[in-house]
């Protein structure tokens, strides 16, 4: 049940527990226990809400930043990653294979705020060798959800 | 003026679904639970392969029997899923949907007056196809108390010395019934003893929610007397691509290829290329869709229990077949009133044979949100009918 449960709540974390039990074909108490277990094991790390900020009047700018760093003896990349992810405006930090080391995503109120962060805070870190900042212009799909189009049922209404 | 029409065709009853379709399509705001096809889009990698084949200019006929690559993949698939061995060169034919396979399969084996056993409720085209092929349809009325499975006794009772073919439509549209290994073994004995052929329509084979589907061709001594029909519509959500296939003994397939060659030429080329991709890399998609259908199926069964509406638990396809006999209306009356008063379309069981009287086909090829909305209306309607009849809620 674990895999199926995770697949459902990954798409819809607000689903009613009773309904979850029905569609999984188990008792409600089992769902409650399994969710508690998944939370305490750190497998379920949070229940966030996907917001398309574009459709609000609130100004937001996001950027992807490629960061090349010098790994530190005994620490690898962990130490520098931590120094970066502690900034609240940083939304994610990934260690990446290939041409650069860390992929940092950032959310700010304006271009100026983001470029300020990169030039004042990120590039000045000792082990950072270089950065390349890419501003996101439009989000078509995020977290598996298409943002630009709504599902439309175009089937004939009654078929054999 | 002289009679311009074929008497045989004029005498065919139009599909019972058509009439209902006409009413529903005039109502813009109706919610439908009447659809017999998946709500999922064809998985993108499969569509992409179709597009790619067009870009490369694969726009010509294929061989009559279909792309060799595809026939080989079908054989691999049947080996992998069902443990069945077919020769891609002589025992597989790619058709325009499972529907064409039903039509030409019957035409290939029937002589005038041969009887075709058709268990009902079932898909709408077996009976007219049998008639058009010169056969005589003999209906076997399946029963709710057997969970709409075909029993050896029912089969035995319907067989005469004119019986040629048994159509075996499982997993079943509209009831959702399946036939398990033991059920198939029981009827296989009768089939062999009376030396009849089976046309096994397994288009919903991938959509079972108990054990994995068993084909009658897997039963000892049955493969040589079975035309197995399957296709891409339901498993891979590819209804519009119109692609199916038939596998069977080469003597029968040879004749089917002949009809197909003269009537159709070959199945759509784009669809055949896309289908190769479906069989090679589509198992995960099928699994994902099956899981979603099963969740909806459980949701519906629970909802029926809560509104105390009688319904046997179906383990196949994407239909449930609740009983509405307690309301003292025909299926058609119920469906028409439900549509008029609650704006929800369901299909009367009688569209799939007279013995569907007293039942409705409800499709769960809809999102859970959509089902919730429609089932809420069904609960209201059922409550209203019970109140009218003076029953306690």
Image (cartoon, rainbow, N blue to C red):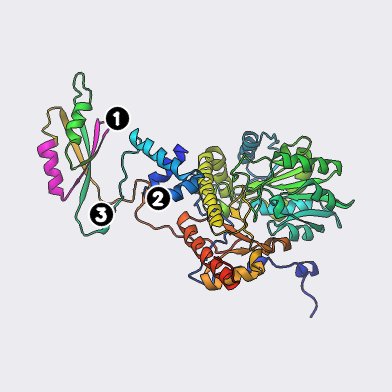
Q: The numbered mark 1 sits on a residue in which chain? A: A
Q: How far apart are marks 1 and 2 (CA)?
A: 39 Å
| Residue in the foreground of this view, choosing between B14 and A16 | A16
- Residue B120: x and y, percent? 73, 56
The N terminus of chain B, quarter of image: bottom right
Q: Which of B290 and A3 is in front in this view?
A: A3
Instruction: State the residue position of label 2.
Output: A15
Residue at the spot 57% in from the left edge and 62% down from the top edge: B34
Figure disc tally: 3
- Chain where mark 2 sits: A
Name the disc covering residue A53, or none: 3
Q: Where is residue B382 in the image (x, y as percent from the top left)?
A: 56, 66
Q: Measuring 25% from the left and 50% from the top, which residue is drawn there?
A: A137
> Would residue A94 be counted in the magenta stretch?
yes
Q: Is residue A6 above or below residue B369?
A: above
Q: Nearer the viewer, mark 3 or mark 1?
A: 3
Residue A98 disc label? 1
For the residues beneath circles 3 and 1, the answer to whether they share a chain is yes
């Amino acid at each position: 049940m674990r895999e199926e449960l995770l697949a459902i709540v990954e798409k819809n974390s607000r689903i009613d527990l009773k309904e979850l039990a029905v569609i999984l074909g188990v008792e409600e108490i089992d769902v409650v226990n399994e969710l508690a277990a998944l939370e305490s094991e750190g497998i379920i790390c949070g229940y966030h809400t996907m917001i398309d900020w574009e459709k609000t009047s609130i100004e937001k700018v996001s950027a992807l930043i490629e960061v090349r760093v010098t790994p530190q003896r005994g620490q690898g990349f962990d130490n520098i990653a931590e120094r970066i992810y502690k900034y609240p405006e940083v939304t994610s930090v990934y260690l990446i294979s290939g041409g650069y080391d860390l992929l940092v995503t950032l959310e700010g109120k304006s271009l100026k705020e983001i470029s300020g962060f990169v030039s004042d805070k990120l590039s000045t870190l000792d082990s950072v060798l270089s950065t390349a900042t890419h501003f996101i212009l439009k989000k078509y799909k995020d977290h598996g959800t298409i943002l630009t189009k709504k599902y439309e049922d175009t089937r004939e209404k009654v078929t054999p | 003026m002289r009679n311009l029409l074929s008497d045989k065709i004029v005498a065919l009853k139009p599909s019972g679904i058509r009439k209902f379709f006409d009413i529903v399509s005039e109502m813009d705001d109706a919610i439908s639970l009447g659809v017999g096809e998946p709500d999922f889009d064809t998985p993108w990698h499969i569509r992409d392969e179709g597009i790619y084949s067009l870009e490369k200019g694969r726009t010509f006929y294929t061989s009559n029997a279909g792309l060799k690559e595809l026939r080989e993949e079908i054989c691999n698939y049947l080996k992998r899923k069902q443990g069945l061995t077919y020769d891609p060169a002589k025992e597989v034919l790619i058709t325009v949907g499972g529907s064409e396979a039903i039509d030409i399969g019957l035409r290939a084996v029937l002589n005038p007056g041969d009887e075709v056993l058709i268990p009902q409720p079932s898909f709408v085209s077996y009976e007219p196809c049998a008639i058009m092929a010169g056969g005589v349809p003999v209906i076997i009325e399946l029963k709710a108390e057997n969970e709409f499975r075909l029993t050896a006794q029912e089969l035995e009772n319907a067989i005469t010395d004119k019986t040629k073919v048994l159509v075996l439509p499982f997993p079943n549209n509209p009831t959702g019934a399946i036939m398990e290994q033991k059920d198939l073994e029981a009827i296989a004995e009768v089939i062999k003893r009376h030396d009849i052929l089976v046309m096994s329509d397994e288009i919903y084979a991938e959509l079972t929610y108990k054990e994995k589907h068993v084909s009658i061709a897997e039963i000892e001594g049955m493969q040589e007397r079975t035309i197995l029909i399957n296709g891409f519509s339901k498993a891979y959500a590819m209804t519009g691509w119109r692609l199916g296939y038939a596998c069977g003994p080469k003597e029968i397939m040879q004749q089917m290829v002949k009809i197909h060659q003269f009537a159709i030429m070959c199945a759509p080329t784009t669809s055949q290329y896309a289908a190769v991709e479906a069989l090679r890399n589509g198992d995960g998609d099928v699994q994902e869709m099956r899981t979603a259908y099963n969740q909806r199926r459980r949701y519906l069964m629970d909802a029926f229990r809560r509104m105390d509406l009688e319904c046997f638990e179906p383990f196949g396809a994407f239909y449930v077949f609740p009983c509405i006999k307690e309301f003292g209306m025909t299926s058609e009356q119920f469906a028409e009133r439900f549509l008029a008063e609650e704006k929800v379309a369901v299909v009367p069981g009688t569209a799939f044979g007279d013995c569907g009287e007293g039942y409705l086909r409800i499709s769960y090829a809809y999102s859970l949100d959509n089902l919730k909305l429609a089932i809420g209306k069904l609960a209201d309607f059922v409550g209203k009918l019970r109140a009218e009849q003076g029953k306690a809620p």
